[in-house]
Image: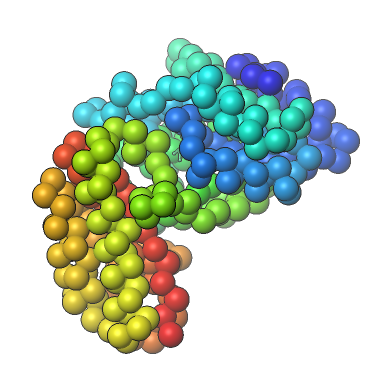
Amino acid sequence: MIITSSGELFSWSSSQRKFGVRVGLVPTMGGLHEGHISLVRAAGRDCGAVVVSIFVNPKQFGQNEDFNLYPRTLDADKNLVESAGLRDKVRLFVPSVEEMYPLGFDSVVHVGGVTGMLEGAFRPTHFDGVSTVVLKLFNISGADVAYFGLKDYQQVCAIRKMVADLNIPIDIVACPIIRGADGVALSSRNSYLSAAQRIQATVLSQSLLIAENLIVSEGCRDVGKIIGAVRDKILTAVDAKIDYIAIADTKNLKELKTLDNCPEAVILLAVKIETTRLIDNKIINIP
Ligand code: PAF
């Protein structure tokens, strides 16, 4: 079930496609949770063959970020993928760093437009690392379709833009955010939170609900007022430090000044709870 070599994965996928089988790719960095498994299930529904990649990609972590700390839980990941019930139509692709970036590797994929703001402003090399590894995974897996979670909203925009700009022959499917019973968006980084910090982390999703209520039920169109209400809620958590709160166009991620005459918008947050940096977002259909 586990493949570590790019050549072997490409051969498997090519043999599937030769027989007309649609190949789906679920790119992950491991530390799998129900959010990832919802992507695996979606791929299993649409495709006759599914590749789940697990690779903690060093190129998308900044120097002072959590590359070394990032959860590496291959046995548990394997069990979770098995629990999706795809049996022998799934392969786990678990390459080494040397397999993905052999000595002399020297290329970068840079996606413009949607990557400079929000996460890109706080993590300047992040999206180059993401687009470089994702394009490699597209090519190695030969997938017809790839699945991404909307929790990383800006990542989905960047991947869609890369696919459009570079005419990459792959369909992109974006799947809904999966939340815990307390509303916290599932993330591999939630494992860094203590029980007390997890309670504090609920302010992210609660602040998004406050914004939605202001816009949809109270008819508020004043972006400053909505962001103020979101900020007030987040700052009720004693250890919360806000990187950004933004209300943006759902397609190009440009920040909106007003919601007048705007059919939909996305609210995006990045907040540190002590040292754990969490992101969340909500698409709002504006009545
Ligand atoms: O979303 C992630 O886990 C990563 O950014 C991805 C898409 C697997 C690329 O390393």
Res. 193 image quadrant: top left
> Can the viewer see residue 102?
no
Q: Residue at x 16, y 49 (%)?
A: 240
Query: Residue 87, located in which quarter of the rendered image?
Result: top right
Residue 169, given in percent of the width and then of the height, sits at 67, 47
Q: Position of residue 15 (x, y in %)?
A: 82, 28
Is 263 drawn above or below residue 153 in the view shown? below
Q: Residue at x 14, y 58 (%)?
A: 236
Q: Which residue occupies the foreground of this view, 88 or 23?
A: 88
215 is higher (above) or lower (below) than 13: below
* Image x and y of residue 56, in percent: 43, 26
Q: How many marks?
A: 0
Quadrant containing the C terminus is bottom left
Answer with the quarter of the image where residue 247 lies: bottom left
Q: Residue at x 51, y 42 (%)?
A: 34
Relative to the observer, which residue lies in front, 113 or 34? 34
23 horizontally vs 241: left or right: right
Q: Quadrant of the N terminus?
A: top right
Q: Which residue is located at x 65 percent, y 37 percent?
A: 84
